[in-house]
Image (cartoon, rainbow, N blue to C red):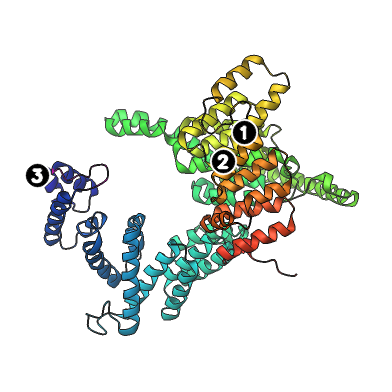
């Protein structure tokens, strides 16, 4: 009775419904409902549907446990009113049902039926009267069906439908957003940005579109455009630095990822450490709350605040920033010449340049250093003038000084030490995240810290399968390091500890087992997975095997090779392509590119290079 009274107050609260089901003995056992439970639940929620005409939960919940004709009847009755009202979130609402292939097939057949009948006679089914639905219903049906095809990995079908919808209603902004998202998922970031920017210009007052467009611009590596667009919702007197004061972490993370792709480490670290500083400020602000809570005797809020502070740096924004900082410092460690504060993004190593190019580069660096010095002197002069005059200039200068200096951070003489600090924070606040352990493996393996590397490897094995591609690669590399150090008169006690800890570790090469044979067996066991094949190929390269042999591990024209390409995710496909490109085997690369292009025809990475 208590839960029924609560539902009378708020009938859309899922926790109240779960409590009522548990109290009536209708909760699922091992995730499955019995036939008797299904019968009682249908009676219960049919009663709720009659009692609360506008209760969406009473109509949506039965879709999660019904099947066959009953599911078809109910999902049909659920979708029609939503399409009539033009609810953009209908697909997101039903997406949780897509784990069941039978339900997906039913939803697709219903949506296709809607589309065909609305197009021919403006009705949902042949049983309805002709022209019983408005023209807008067809647009929302197209929007839903395009969403469905995009999610099912059929982007060309989705784009064809979207174009039809746009020709029907050229001002339907949601269709442009879906079109941009489709191209984004195919990694055509420039086209996605162009489309979304056009959608933004259709409604300049929409802050959501503005924010979305900024993120798409960063993905397309258009930093100037992103900064120009984000300024549209700032005050006239504000600068781009004002976003630091606003703690706009979504902007800083997107901007940092863009600079990281461009190998512009100073600007990337500026934004990433800005996010880290925001969390530091949030943590310090709690001290004002202690006395306030005690004075107001709001003890429950006080306890909640203390619990929140304990897991503050477990927030996804902090984790993203910390992982990116680790990645940035690892790249700086691997290629220190590129990380110089006077270097340009993508600059080649000095050793690869000719004498003439080196002289030109040194001249350019000297001029850049002079400009930096002049700029620093000018800023110092401005600060001095602001201190005299006071006012807004002083606050702006103070704000600029509080922003982390990316150039100094990128010039850290010990980048792995800085990365270790972030790894420790991740291990403290996000120990159960797989990415945390991978970051630890990347850092500690480079620092030659075998015990810490082993600790991270064992933790990763507890989180993910030992056959995980990244874990396999790290396991082989660690085993290789152990054997090389053992031969180089390593501490006998350390050797014994490592041997004892690894001999019972699943997914780790056994003592005396040759690493190339272990890697070949892994490849044989997972030859139908492109991600696993790439992992084995990288191990072959690290073990000093021939590049052509490493390339053959990624792709061959066998049935297994074709199956691996067909079942591969786009992320795995790009990783495979980039790895083969690094091997400098043009013919093999072209063969792989053609196979990947056939699977992902809209992805620019796999398109044939233009003759120019």
- Residue position marked by numbered label 2 in the rendering: 470
Left or right position of 391 against 416 = left
Residue 234, position as x, y percentages in the image: 50, 57
Question: Can you say whether 528 is above or below 163 in the image?
Answer: above
Residue 301, position as x, y percentages in the image: 30, 34
Residue 330, position as x, y percentages in the image: 65, 38
Question: Can you say whether 309 is above or below 54 in the image?
Answer: above
> Disc 3 on helix, strand or loop?
loop
Specify start and end residues of the magenta stretch as a single range. 24-33
> Disc 2 on helix, strand or loop?
helix
Q: Was residue 31 drawn as part of the magenta stretch in this picture?
A: yes
Of the numbered discs 2 and 3, the one sitting upstream in the chain is 3
Of the numbered discs 3 and 1, the one sitting upstream in the chain is 3
Main SS of residues in magenta: loop
Which of discs 2 and 3 lies nearer the camera? The answer is: 2
- Residue position marked by numbered label 1 in the rendering: 443
Q: Was residue 269 drawn as part of the magenta stretch in this picture?
A: no
Mark 1 residue crowding within 10 angstroms, few (<14) / some (14–19) / many (20+): many
Image quadrant in which the N terminus is located: top left
Viewer-proximal residue among 18 and 540: 540
Mark 2 residue crowding within 10 angstroms, few (<14) / some (14–19) / many (20+): some
Left or right position of 514 against 99 = right
Question: Can you say whether 180 is above or below 323 in the image?
Answer: below
Instruction: Report the Cα–Cα distance between label 2 and label 1.
Output: 14 Å
Q: Residue furthest left?
A: 1
Question: Which residue is at a point 54% across and 50% down the rendered structure image?
Answer: 529
Left or right position of 237 against 340 = left
- Residue position marked by numbered label 3 in the rendering: 1
Q: Disc count in the image?
A: 3
């Amino acid at each position: 009775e208590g839960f029924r009274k609560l539902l009378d107050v708020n009938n859309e609260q899922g926790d109240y419904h779960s409590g009522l089901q548990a109290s009536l003995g209708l909760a699922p056992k091992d995730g499955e409902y019995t036939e008797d439970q299904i019968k009682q639940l249908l009676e219960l929620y049919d009663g709720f549907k009659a009692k609360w005409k506008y209760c969406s939960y009473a109509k949506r919940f039965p879709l999660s446990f019904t099947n066959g004709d009953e599911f078809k009847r109910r999902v049909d009755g659920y979708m029609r009113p939503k399409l009539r009202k033009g609810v953009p979130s209908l697909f997101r609402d039903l997406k949780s049902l897509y784990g069941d292939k039978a339900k997906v097939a039913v939803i697709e057949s219903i949506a296709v039926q809607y589309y065909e009948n609305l197009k021919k006679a403006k009705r949902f089914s042949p049983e309805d009267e002709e022209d019983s639905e408005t023209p807008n219903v067809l647009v929302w049906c197209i929007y839903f069906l395009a969403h469905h095809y995009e999610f099912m990995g059929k982007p060309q079908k989705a784009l064809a439908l979207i174009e039809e919808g746009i020709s029907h209603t050229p001002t339907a902004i949601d269709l442009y957003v879906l079109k941009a998202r489709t191209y984004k998922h195919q990694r055509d970031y420039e086209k996605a940005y162009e489309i979304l920017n056009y959608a933004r210009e259709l409604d300049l007052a929409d802050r959501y579109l503005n924010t979305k467009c900024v993120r798409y611009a960063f993905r397309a590596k258009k930093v100037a455009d992103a900064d120009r667009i984000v300024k549209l919702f700032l005050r006239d007197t504000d600068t781009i630095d004002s976003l630091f004061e606003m703690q706009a972490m979504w902007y800083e993370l997107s901007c940092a990822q863009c600079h990281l792709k461009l190998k512009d480490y100073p600007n990337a670290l500026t934004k990433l450490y800005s996010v880290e500083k925001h969390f530091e400020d949030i943590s310090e602000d709690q001290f004002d709350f202690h006395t306030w809570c005690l004075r107001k005797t709001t003890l429950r809020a006080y306890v909640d605040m203390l619990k929140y502070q304990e897991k503050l740096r477990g927030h996804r924004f902090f984790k993203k920033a910390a992982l990116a900082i680790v990645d940035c410092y690892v790249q700086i460690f691997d290629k220190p010449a590129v990380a110089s504060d006077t270097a340009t993004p993508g600059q080649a190593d000095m050793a690869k340049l000719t004498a003439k190019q080196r002289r030109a580069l040194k001249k350019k660096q000297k001029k850049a250093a002079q400009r930096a010095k002049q700029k620093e002197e000018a800023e110092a002069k401005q600060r001095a003038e602001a201190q005299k005059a006071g006012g807004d200039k002083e606050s702006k200068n103070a704000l600029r000084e509080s922003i982390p200096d990316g150039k100094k951070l990128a010039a850290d003489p010990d980048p792995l030490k800085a990365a270790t600090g972030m790894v420790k924070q991740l291990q403290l606040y996000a120990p159960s995240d797989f990415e945390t352990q991978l970051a630890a493996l990347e850092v500690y393996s480079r620092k030659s810290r075998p015990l810490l590397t082993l600790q991270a490897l064992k933790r990763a094995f507890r989180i993910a399968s030992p056959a995980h591609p990244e874990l396999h690669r790290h396991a082989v590399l660690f085993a290789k390091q152990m054997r090389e150090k053992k031969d180089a008169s390593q501490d006998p006690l350390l050797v014994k500890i490592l041997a004892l800890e690894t001999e019972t570790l699943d997914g780790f090469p056994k003592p005396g087992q040759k690493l190339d044979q272990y890697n070949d067996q892994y490849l044989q066991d997972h030859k139908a997975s492109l991600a696993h094949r790439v992992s084995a190929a990288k191990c072959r390269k690290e073990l000093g095997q021939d590049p052509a042999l490493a390339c053959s591990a990624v792709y061959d024209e066998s049935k297994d090779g074709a199956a691996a390409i067909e079942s591969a995710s786009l992320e795995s496909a790009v990783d495979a392509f980039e790895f083969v490109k690094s091997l400098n085997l043009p013919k093999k690369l072209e063969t792989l590119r053609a196979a990947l292009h056939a699977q992902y025809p809209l992805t620019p990475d796999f398109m044939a290079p233009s003759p120019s």
